[in-house]
Image (tube, rainbow, N blue to C red):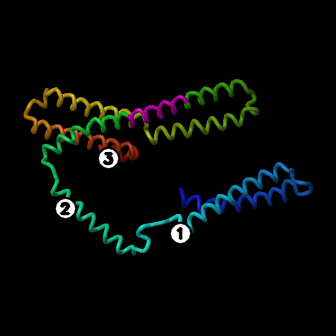
Amino acid sequence: MQVLGLYCTPALCVFVILSWIAAKNTIWLNRDMPDSAHGAFFAIAAALAGSSAFQFALEFTSEFWDWEDERTSVAQLQLELELSEERRILEARRLTPSPVERQASYKERTPVEVERLRKESRHYRRVHLWMQWLLFVCSASVTAITAWYDPPQPGKGALIFLGFTITVITAATGYFKPRERAFNLQQTADSIEQHVTALDLGISPYAQTDSANLELFATTVENIRIEQRKREQQLDQPHQGQQEVV
């Protein structure tokens, strides 16, 4: 955002000034330009100019950017980063817990994953419902306007807009498939939650020892997540590609 503002604000300021000149020479060529139009262009140009000056002052003022390593070379920083990464890996190997502890930690993180899947499912379900309602309203509006205006010349613009909207919504629904995505996410979340409940209650298939149950649980949940990713990939592919994958 900082880089975008640094480059775009001066360009917008120049564009406003050129628009000011163009408006004077085209719309108000043979008469005086209203003071309100002058004031609007001047206010916008002044605001953009002030914003540009402020951003440049912050960017090139050394007192504002007080870096602790400003005199360190990039090569030295890269070397320190690589050494820090090596130390992190060695420390992680030394403190790596046992498989049973990692599996227990994985089980504790599962509810967060279930909540994330449900949240994404609700998001796609809302998107699908909004698309369907908009499609219903536009389709009904086309019929109503066509029946109301005969000949349809006064409502021609509205019919063109509604037809364009219906085409875009239909294409977006068929391409992004929000309903299928919501169903897959909800199904995955329900399946993982079912296994979490079975593990907590100690019922089949988790009626063994704790270590065996945790290993089976981690394996099952990972397989469910892999199947979810495969279904997402199938939705992202064209129809012919989906048949080949299946």
Nearer to the camera, 9 or 143: 9
Q: Earlier in the sequence, mark 3 or mark 1?
A: 1
Residue tagged by mark 3?
Answer: 244
Residue 100 is left or right of residue 156, and the answer is left
Mark number displayed over residue 62: 1
Does 164 sit above or below residue 61?
above
Q: Tell me the kind of residue under disc 2.
A: Leu
Give how far across and how far down residue 224 sits, in percent: 25, 39
Nearer to the camera, 53 or 32: 53
Q: Tell me the kind of residue under disc 3.
A: Glu
Q: Earlier in the sequence, mark 2 or mark 3?
A: 2
Q: Tell me the kind of residue under disc 1.
A: Ser
Region in magenta: 119-133
Q: Residue at x 53, y 64 (%)?
A: 64
Residue tagged by mark 2?
Answer: 90
In the orientation shown, which residue stands out farthest toward the front? Answer: 63
Which quadrant, please, contains the C terminus? Answer: top left
Q: Quadrant of residue 176?
A: top left
Nearer to the camera, 245 or 129: 129
Q: Earlier in the sequence, mark 2 or mark 1?
A: 1
